[in-house]
Each structure stands twice: as structure tokens, then as C-alpha cells.
Amino acid sequence: MRTRYILLCASTIAVLFNVAPAAGQEDDRFSWGGMIRSRLQGDYQDGSRAVNRFMYGAFLNATLRVTDRIDVTGKVMTGNPKAITVADWMSYGDLFVRENPHISWMYARIRPSPSLTLTAGKFPLPFFRPTQVVLDSDLSPEGLAQQITTKSADGSATFGLNLGQFMINQLASPVKDLDRTYFLGGQAMARFTQPGKSQTLAVAYYTVGGADSLFAAQNLRSPALIVAANSNRPNADRTGYLSEFRMVNLSGQYTQTLNGRPLALNADYVFNMGADDMRHGITGSVMYGSTGKVGDTRTGIQLYLMQQDATLAPFSNIDYTQTNTKGAALFFGHHLIEKLTVDIHLYTRKYDSPETLVSPSANNAWRTRLRVMFMLRLN
């Protein structure tokens, strides 16, 4: 396994050096970036012993502009490739022991016209999402996506249509021996801009087919084939989910420059038409400031109320919220020195119905997580 990854990395580097443009053209055709992150995380609740963890992660991505209309992008990262919402986090000492670097993105993006973009491969999500209520930002699905945009004559309004057809447990994944789980999504959005402010509205419909395959991979296999949230209701036989997942998502974002700093108000509402009850979810946040330059500071607050089957929990594992829960979060970030930023997050939440979980929880106390994270950009 380790040899395969070493050969893969070596081949990738060789290809990049062979196709990379001359030094004078590099800025035009080739770009790269990356980050090394480290965090201290503590979880606390009444009646339980506190759990503290030191974790770290890293990723490296590169984009080659093949032509004016075609880009190719790849991303290699640390972390557990069995996680559906793949993040680069891992415990110290796990690299090359329990976990190996793996490919998170490998896709081509084609622009036949200024208003049409086609994407194929394994790529980041193509939908507008002011919060992560339905789809976690760490998801890297495999499949196809299409984006259509048009602007008004004066450029003050942009209208778009985002479409996606994904395979969740794709052939390269650890769940390839189970039924195919597919994801289909369509989103219409509109963005209006004025001097110093903007408004974005979107409505989306997402459906998941073969979702019981994810339930089986996580709960009916030993060891489990995936790592994901586990907070939806099981059916009576405990062989799959109680509900299907056909979700309508309404999203909104308002941004404005206030005292020279950006202010953003974000809101998401999801309604699962595939559930008979417990099918509503709402998340909202207010963020002020940025960490774009040395000395900059950002603060924010998030509130959430997620009923148990509002969305498919493995896709919406928003760090600490999941479904069947309510709570709040506070954010603070500061750009310490060139390329080094610190983020402090404080989450608190409580299960609404702990007895309905796949693994019922006897303690329905408020759970609190404190996270201190340092991020070093590589480029």
C-alpha cells in the first residue's frame, strides 16, 4: 500500500515537471497551494470524562491550465480515506502507520463558453452553500457536474444553474462491494450586487439513491467500511434508514462592508420530503471580519436546529452538529504572522432524542467541544 502511494506521488511529480511551462509562463499556466494544520480538541459533557486530542493534517493541490478553456486539478491529502466527508485530520503518529496520503481531487474542468462549465472526475462540491447543513465541505464526490451562469447587461445580477450527478461509493472506495449509492442534485441561484454589498438566494433539490448501502457499510459490517455521522433513525429491522432522502434546500446570504470589514449573514433551511416526520433543519450564522491579511480578525456565531431525518447525516457532518441535535457555536480567527492563522471554535449541542439513535445514548447532557487550530499556508 505504501509503495503504491510513493509510486503515485513520484509519477505525479514527474508528470507535473514534464508538462509544466517554462519559468516565464508558470504564473499563467500552473498554480499550486497547500496547508499544514494542527489542532487541540477537547470534548466535555456532564457525567463523562473529558476527552482531549492532538491532531494534524496536510494537503497539497495543483492546477494546470491546459488551454484557455480546460483546467486539470489534483489534490493529495492526509487523513482517513474511509471517511465519506474526507478531511485531512489524523492523530499524531498515524501517517504511514494507520493512514496513508490519498487523492482527494482529480478532475478536469472544461468551459465550452463563458456561461457553461463542465466538470468530470473527483472534485469539490459545485453547489452554493452558505452553511454545511446538507452537504459537508469536505465531501469529494466522483462524477459529473454542470454549471450555467448568465449576467445582466450592467453586471449587477448573476443567475445560475448548478447540476451534479455523483457516485458516493465509487469504484475506488472501500464500499465498492455494496449497492451503488448515487446523488443527484440541481440548484437555481441568483446573486445581486451593489457597491459594498450583495445578496444571494438559492433553491436546490437533492436526492440520494441506495442510501441503505451507507447504513450497511457503517453499521452492519465489522470492521465498519466507512467513517461518518450516525444520527439518522434506523428502520424497524435495523437494516437501513427509516426514511428516504429527497431534500429541498433554501439558502440565503447577505454580505456588506461595515467599517471596512466584511459582514456576512448566512442561512440554510432543509426539508426532507422522504421522511414522514422529524424532517426539518435550519442553520444560521453571522460572521464579521476576515483573516486575509496579517493582523486581521474574524468573529462569528452559528445556531442550528436539526431534526433527526432532515438530511442524510453522513453527508452533513458539520463538525459537531450532525442531525437530531440543537445547539450553537462561536468562532474566532486571527492572522498571526505571514501565512499563519489561528482559529478557535466553541461548539455546544444536545441530542433531541438520544433513544432513537442507532447506538442509543443514555446521557442527554449538553456536549461541548473546544477547538484551537493553527493553519500554515504553503503558498
Image (cartoon, grey):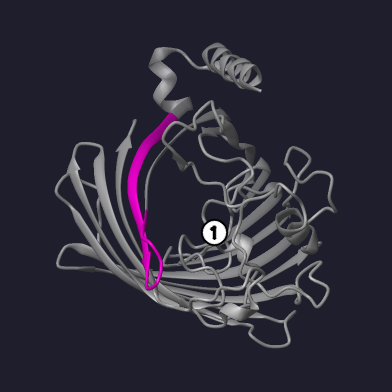
Amino acid type at mark 1: Asp
Judge left or right: residue 44 versus residue 114: left
Q: Look at 77% across and 63% down and name the residue there.
A: 211
Q: Look at 42% across and 21% down and name the residue there.
A: 26
Do we see residue 73 in this rendering?
no
Q: Is residue 297 magenta?
A: no
Judge left or right: residue 8 versus residue 59: right
Q: Look at 64% across and 40% down and name the residue there.
A: 110
Instruction: Provide the major secondary structure of the magenta segment.
Output: strand
Could you say which is closer to the camera, residue 190 or residue 286?
286
Could you say which is closer to the camera, residue 230 or residue 121?
230
Q: Which residue is mark 1?
A: 136
Could you say which is closer to the camera, residue 12 or residue 343?
343
Q: Which residue is the extreme one toward the bottom?
A: 277
| Image location (x, y in percent) of residue 271 | 63, 81
Magenta region: 32-51
| Image location (x, y in percent) of residue 58 | 43, 35
